[in-house]
Amino acid sequence: MTPPAIRIVLADDERMVRTALRAILSAEPGLEVVGEAATGAEAVSVVRERRPDVVLMDVRMPEIDGIRATEQIVAGLPQPPRIVVVTTFENDSYVYDALRAGAAGFLLKRSDADTLVQAVRLVARTDSLLFPSAVRALAHRHAAPAAAPAPWVGRLTGRERDVLRHMAAGLTNAEIARRLEVGPATVKSHVAAVLAKTGARDRTQAVIAAYASGFLSTG
Amino acid sequence: MTPPAIRIVLADDERMVRTALRAILSAEPGLEVVGEAATGAEAVSVVRERRPDVVLMDVRMPEIDGIRATEQIVAGLPQPPRIVVVTTFENDSYVYDALRAGAAGFLLKRSDADTLVQAVRLVARTDSLLFPSAVRALAHRHAAPAAAPAPWVGRLTGRERDVLRHMAAGLTNAEIARRLEVGPATVKSHVAAVLAKTGARDRTQAVIAAYASGFLSTG
DNA sequence: ATCCCTCTCCGCCGGACGGGGGAGACGGTG
DNA sequence: CACCGTCTCCCCCGTCCGGCGGAGAGGGAT
């Protein structure tokens, strides 16, 4: 038996572009265009009802642009499709916004047919491909330094936060004890708790976790 | 007439991995593995003489890791090949470094054969695909705000940078030694040098300095 | 009133770490 | 050739750290 076809929705305000894309993709075995949209708003609703695997999303569209549409789709569906943002120029600053919005990939309009097809197949098959979520994390970090709340942050007690802050300043247990005016044994207890809750093996890893999670700015 | 085959070089320190990759890729029409390398240094020289179109580059390799090898290849050749960095975990902080180094793509080791093949074809064909240079520009922009080059960064030797990178990943001396395939005593020496040059008192402070100075992005 | 969490502190132990000092090999420079 | 920087590795030693288990005091919740 053949695997189920990859379901695709095209979102572009130019009919000609949609037609061309449909022609290319429909000719491919295993690919199926299940919907089209001419505006961002339309894209959101079409995706909601057709449940495609992949969306080819133009950036520039009336009403809602492709970026905001991507945002809404990714945020609004439990298992959002993989969204490939299509643009004309490589230097489009949209690239960056698209990443933040949760797009899975980027494609230039000047790409040839084979590239298009392969990109769709690749993006549909796996979430472990070229530039995975780590890139999106990077984009988030760039835009919002207070990016990753990290689950363990909330589980730390007040005192443990104090201690972690001082750890992240490079102090030894003895120094932290002096700063907080408690005994060294107390600090050891808190450090142990911090390590356990952060899943860190030693203070260095705990500090790394603190940096990576934005704890230092928020905490 | 058939188009010329895509020339591929494999760089991975594990022979089994290379063998497996070669088996998968060689079975594909239009793909040709023209060289292998087991270390970063070897990768650089093999690429220099074989002039492949695509390099599959493991991150973790003895002598020079995949990131530095990528840097050297991209910087050293007028028309460098497209380099796809291969890693085990999505969360590897290497993703970011790889982008800055000039890698064209990212691939997880757990990817299946088809994904691998398509990724290679895609990356070989075009420079206008998923996440093109604009992403790298983004990465640079992200690194820029941290600005402060820090005087000590330039004073570190190559090996010391390697060690610091691993320290900043939370590894112990013994682990670093295994990764770099040197003795524990050697790592201790490098760590001592790093501490001296950074003015840090212990590894935790050194990691903090690395984060604060943006070394992790630039180094 | 009882329980649970938090903060405080204790001892013991093994392993990791950092300081000190030294040394051989290689490659490039003067 | 001699020198210097880098990378590799060795010794000893004291300290810091983290894991283990335990415990008392206070506060808040039920």
Image (cartoon, coloured by chain):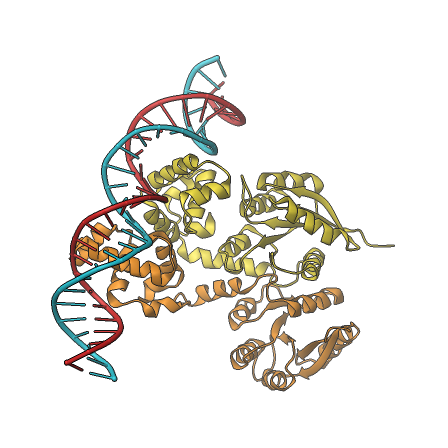
Chain colours: A orange, B yellow, C red, D cyan
Residue at the spot 58% in from the left edge and 85% down from the top edge:
A41
Q: Nearer the viewer, residue A5 or B5?
A: A5
Look at the picture and state if B121 lies above or below A83. Answer: above
Q: Nearer the viewer, residue A211 or B26?
A: B26
Name the quadrant of the N terminus of chain B: bottom right
**Image spot of residue C16 (x, y percent):** 36, 44
- Is residue B80 visible in this depiction of the protein? no
Q: Quadrant of residue A111?
A: bottom right
Residue at the spot 69% in from the left edge and 80% down from the top edge:
A14
**Image spot of residue A28 (x, y percent):** 78, 72
Q: Is residue C2 left or right of residue A201?
A: left
**Image spot of residue B129 (x, y percent):** 65, 62
Q: Quadrant of residue A207?
A: bottom left
Look at the picture and state if A107 lies above or below B53. Answer: below
Q: Is residue B73 left or right of residue B166?
A: right
Q: Quadrant of residue D9?
A: top left
Look at the picture and state if D10 lies above or below A59. Answer: above
